[in-house]
Image (cartoon, grey):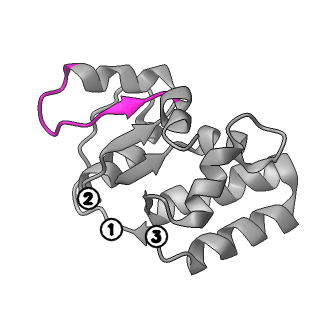
Amino acid sequence: MTVVIDCNILVICLTSRSPYHNIYKAIVAGDFILAVTTDIILEYEEVIEKKYGPATSNAFIALLNELPNVRVFTTYYHWQLITTDPDDNKYCDCAVAGQADFIVTEDRHFDILEKILFPKLVAIPIEVFSAMFK
């Protein structure tokens, strides 16, 4: 299973006090392939640094670089599927490039994907994804 994880979801999963920490553990255990792009990694780095500090951010990015189930994709085409928040398109483009099964997000901008027939992308909420690893 290949998955793209929205930055806000990833940040929620990092702390061991989170009810969704099992997603972080599943990443580390290699239970699924995490599809990312350079832009997504940079956003992860920036947001984690703001929330947890540079040491945590640097350690997490270093971990992503070492894990064999983290795949960095290059997007050669920008689909521009989300017009309400164009910054979210990096996740859609990565999902297409990585042939992801899901985009895990709570962002309502991704609801538009239900109406788009091609490329067909599926966004699921954190609760649904987390339940796959309980």
Image quarter (top left, top right, bottom left or bottom right) of the C terminus: top right
Q: Earlier in the sequence, mark 3 or mark 1?
A: 3
Other residues around mark 1 within 10 Å, as few (<14) / some (14–19) / many (≥20) = some
Residue type indicated by callout 3: Asn
**Residue 86 falls left or right of residue 131:** left
Image quarter (top left, top right, bottom left or bottom right) of the N terminus: bottom left
- Foreground: disc 3 or disc 2: 3
- Foreground: disc 3 or disc 1: 3
Give the residues drawn in magenta, as a range.
Answer: 115-125
Q: Residue at x 61, y 39 (%)?
A: 9
Residue 115 at x, y = what percent?
20, 19
Other residues around mark 2 within 10 Å, as few (<14) / some (14–19) / many (≥20) = some
* SS state under label 2: helix
* Residue 22 or residue 7, whichever sits in front: 22
**Residue 27 seen in the current view:** yes
C-alpha span from label 3 to label 2? 16 Å
Residue 32 at x, y = what percent?
44, 58
Quarter of the image where one finds residue 67: bottom right
Residue 113 at x, y = what percent?
28, 27
Q: Which of marks 3 and 2 is nearer the N terminus?
A: 3
Contact check, label 3 and label 1, Cβ < 8 Å: no
Residue type indicated by callout 1: Thr
- Foreground: disc 2 or disc 1: 2
* SS state under label 1: loop
Q: Residue 74 carries which label?
A: 1
Q: Where does label 2 land, which residue?
A: 97
Q: Where does label 3 land, which residue?
A: 69
Residue type indicated by callout 2: Ala
Q: Which residue is drawn at 84% across and 40% down?
A: 17
Q: Which of marks 2 and 1 is nearer the N terminus?
A: 1
Q: In the image, is residue 119 part of the stretch drawn in magenta?
A: yes
Contact check, label 2 and label 1, Cβ < 8 Å: yes
